[in-house]
Image: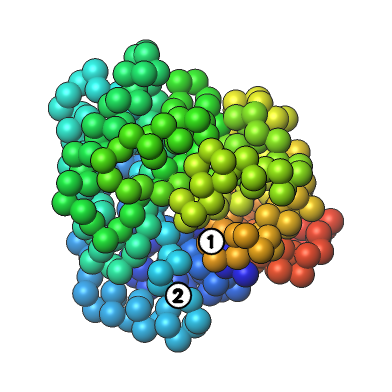
């Protein structure tokens, strides 16, 4: 099963990311090549990159399944300030080049938020941005992420379908289970859900799945992730998605919260990914996840 989590990209860069993933028993991972809240980026260190590639291979991870995520603040949907929009396009070009330099094949991108503009205008802005930045035809593919539709977010399945059909260049899709749930998609019947995904965007366009539970009911449009089995989607549904035959070649990435001694404890104490990955591999829910692994 291709499963991992988001991991840090610190002083050891991709090597540190890979080491963290291996410590969780992961077979893939996702990273931000700098802080997700800003666009400050350091040069990729060639010696660390060489060691990272060696370490990844030695530990049985296929670099072709490793995912990068663009920072949250990039917003192609809003073009009220042309200079900021152009900066986003230029930054994404540089980020795609960084991914290519690291040998990473996929970069997840939030489509953006309209922020006071009409949705049709926001969608055209995204298309213009994608067409502009993809003219150079990078080896790294952009994956548009399904969003929870909080505020003026773009990223419903219909939005993604429109963008896939109308962009001049091939892009892919990243499904986020929490976001889909919060946007109003019922995941409880997994086969029915996958049929709908295939009809809307095509399963052959899905290259990554963010596997998250949700603290909210279907259609709440809130985007609050929960640990696997501790939310409204539930362990059984998420486990079925993780093991589904139609999704076996797609990396599943956990973005669940750090947890403390109890579900009510919001202080970040440790990453739960090793235990959540083990639960999903074993297909057995750990009712004592919060209490027994601090």
Residue at screen point 16% across, 51% down: 136
- 3D distance between C-alphas at marks 2 and 1: 12 Å
* SS assignment at label 2: loop
x then y, percent, for residue 121? 32, 18
**Percent x, y for residue 212?**
63, 48
Q: Nearer the viewer, mark 2 or mark 1?
A: 1
Above or below residue 195? Residue 158 is above
Residue at the bottom extreme, as displayed: 58
Work out which residue is located at the far right of the displayed protein and give it: 287
Q: Give the class, few, some or many, for how many residues have Cα within 10 Å of label 1's Cα (few <14, many ≥20).
A: some
Q: Residue furthest front?
A: 199
Residue at x 28%, y 26% (from the top left corner): 125
Near-viewer residue (162 or 68) = 162
Count of numbered circles on the image: 2
Q: Position of residue 82 (x, y in %)?
A: 17, 24
Q: Is residue 60 visible?
A: yes
Q: Counting residues from the N terminus, which is met first, the one under dot 2 or under dot 1?
A: 2
In the rendered image, residue 222, in percent from the top left (x then y), is placed at 60, 28
Provide the residue designation for mark 2.
Answer: 62
Question: Is residue 266 something one can see in this rendering?
Answer: no
Q: Is residue 162 left or right of residue 287?
A: left
- In the drawing, what numbered circle is on residue 215? none
Q: Residue at x 30, y 38 (%)?
A: 167
Indicate the quadrant where residue 254 lies.
Answer: bottom right
Q: Nearer the viewer, residue 71 or 79?
A: 79
The residue singled out by tag 1 in the image is 250
**Left or right: 42, with 116 as reference point:** left
Helix, strand or loop under label 1? loop
Quadrant in which the C terminus is drawn: bottom right
Q: Quadrant of the N terminus?
A: bottom right
């Amino acid at each position: 099963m291709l499963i991992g989590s988001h991991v840090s990209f610190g002083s050891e860069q991709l090597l540190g990311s890979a080491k963290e993933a291996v410590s969780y028993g992961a077979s893939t991972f996702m990273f931000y090549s700098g802080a997700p809240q800003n666009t400050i980026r350091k040069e990729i260190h060639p010696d660390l990159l060489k060691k990272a590639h060696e370490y990844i291979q030695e530990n049985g991870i296929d670099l072709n399944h490793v995912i990068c995520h663009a920072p949250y603040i990039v917003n192609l949907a809003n073009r009220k300030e042309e200079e900021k929009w152009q900066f986003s396009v230029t930054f994404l070009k540089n980020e795609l080049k960084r991914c290519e330099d690291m040998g990473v094949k996929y970069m997840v991108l939030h489509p953006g938020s309209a922020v006071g503009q009409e949705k049709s205008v926001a969608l055209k802005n995204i298309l213009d941005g994608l067409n502009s930045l993809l003219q150079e035809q990078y080896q790294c593919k952009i994956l548009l992420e399904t969003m929870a539709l909080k505020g003026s977010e773009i990223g419903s399945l219909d939005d993604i379908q429109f963008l896939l059909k109308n962009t001049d260049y091939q892009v892919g899709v990243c499904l986020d289970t929490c976001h889909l749930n919060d946007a109003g998609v019922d995941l409880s019947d997994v086969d029915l859900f996958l049929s709908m995904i295939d009809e809307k965007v095509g399963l052959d366009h899905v290259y990554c799945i963010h596997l998250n539970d949700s603290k909210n009911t279907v259609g709440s449009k809130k985007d609050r992730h929960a640990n696997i089995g501790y939310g409204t989607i539930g362990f059984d549904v998420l486990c079925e998605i993780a093991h589904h035959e139609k999704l076996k070649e797609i990396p599943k990435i956990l973005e669940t919260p750090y947890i403390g001694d109890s579900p009510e404890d919001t202080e970040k104490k440790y990453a739960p990914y090793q235990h959540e990955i083990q639960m999903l591999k074993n297909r057995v829910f750990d009712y004592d996840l919060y209490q027994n692994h601090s």
